[in-house]
Image (spheres, rainbow, N blue to C red):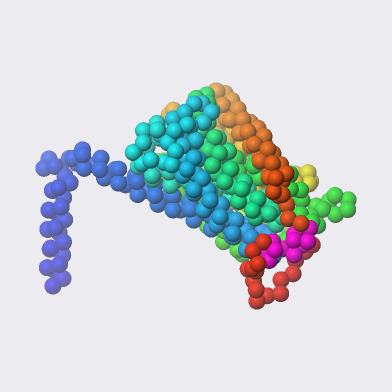
Amino acid sequence: MTKKVIITVLVLTCLLSLNVFALNGSVEGEKVSDAKYMADTLWVLVAAFLVFFMQAGFAMVESGFTRAKNAVNILMKNLMDFSMGSIAYWAIGFAIMFGTGNAFMGTSGWFVPADSTAFASLEWSSVPTHAAWLFQLVFAATAATIVSGAMAERTQFKSYLIYSVFITGIIYPIVGHWIWGGGWLSSMGMWDFAGSTVVHSTGGWLALTGAIVLGPRIGKYDAEGKPRPIAGHNLPLAALGVFILWLGWFGFNPGSQMGADAAPISGIAVTTNLAAAAGAITAMITAWIFLGKPDAGMSLNGALAGLVAITAGCAFVSPVSSAIIGALGGIVVVLSVLMFERLRIDDPVGAISVHGTCGALGTILLGFFANTEDLKGVFFGGGFELLWAQIVGVVAVLVWCLVTGFILFYGIKALTGLRVTEDEEQAGLDYEEHGASAYPDFNVSSIR
């Protein structure tokens, strides 16, 4: 019986092969094209699913690094920024980002029609428009989620819903158009393969403006203005979140190839992983030097810093260069966290440093380390043209985010209010905003 099954399978395989291969042994062009189209689409969708799962990673990181009394609030924010962001990015965001328009923004392609010719900036990819939209949507949601971490434990929930829609629908897509949609930064030669600046710095700089407008949490600084640690309630949960994000980055960066091209996506996966590992190691060492202990929180953020830093150049640098970029990200993130604390900018999860600072760092470092046939950095004989374009891009996005961020957050503060009351903050946002607790069977205490 077993032999008959084997023989049957072999015969069917040979018969099916006749449909795929010509009699001379060459692959028929039309069928190869169809197979490539399907493989590219499948890969982009799988990558999008991986990046979507990063929402769970952000939820775990942010809730783990904050206090138990605010865990439900964090989870609700991550749920709703993706849900509301999906509608905003479908209605207007994708059109602003990739639609045909001008150097500042796209002006066509509203509501993402599948058969539209409005998205000329995506013609280099063969995947269907809706597959490209889904992949870009999860990037947009990432930018909005970054902001929630830096503003955690003291922001009104309704205010969060308002600003997440503006970020996903307008502010982020305009940055994306400048660099990925055929806008002015793209025209001057700036490169950002998977979004160190487009996604991460945009989220990080908007987080910076939100944290400044909000002010620090109650009890974060003593009477002399010195920062005091406010411990997160669940470091294992935060660690799980980091590993989920690390996994999701294998969709984030290789997926940005927008095609199932074996060699490129394999190389991107390698550079991505090496940067994360190097970032974790150097952050641990840096924290050990400055804090006297190999701090777990800093080490976890070091891995994320390495991932953020390599995102701009993951397709354009060698494995050795990627390890260097990640290592520099791990060092810089620790120093950045300490700097912002001393500046009295309270960021409970280190989002500004991980995404804003290290996103800018990675984008600029591409100008030094790029080494492909078509793109050369300073260290590989390319001159300073690329480096200059990268610096201009980083500064332009920083200015755009600071201006729009302050307008957005001060506007919300004036119209609806931005921060909860002192009593609500002390009691925790879970009960005050949502009437629930993440741990109803436990007696939860907190540092005030």
Name which residue lies at 73% across and 55% down: 420
Q: Can residue 45 be seen here? A: yes
Write the residue at 14% across / 47% down: 19
Q: Nearer the viewer, residue 128 or 43?
A: 128
Closer-to-camera residue (60/400): 400
Q: Tell me where the magenta segment starts and ends, as one range.
A: 422-432
- In the visual, does 274 lie left or right of 291? left
* Residue 427 in magenta stretch: yes
The quadrant of the picture occupied by the C terminus is: bottom right
* x, y percent for residue 280: 61, 51
Please indicate, yes or no, whether residue 327 appears anywhere in the rendered image: no
Q: Quadrant of residue 128?
A: top left
Q: Residue furthest right?
A: 224
Prevailing secondary structure of the magenta residues: helix
* Residue at left offset 49%, top offset 35%: 96
| Residue 20 horizontal/vertical position (percent) | 17, 46
Residue 341, horizontal then vertical, whole percent: 76, 48
Side of 369 relative to 420 (left or right)? left
Query: For the point 58% across and 30% down, which residue is it?
Result: 393
Q: Is residue 91 above or below residue 59?
A: above
Tell whether 237 sits left or right of 218.
Answer: left
Q: Is residue 266 magenta?
A: no
Q: Quadrant for the N terminus, please.
A: bottom left
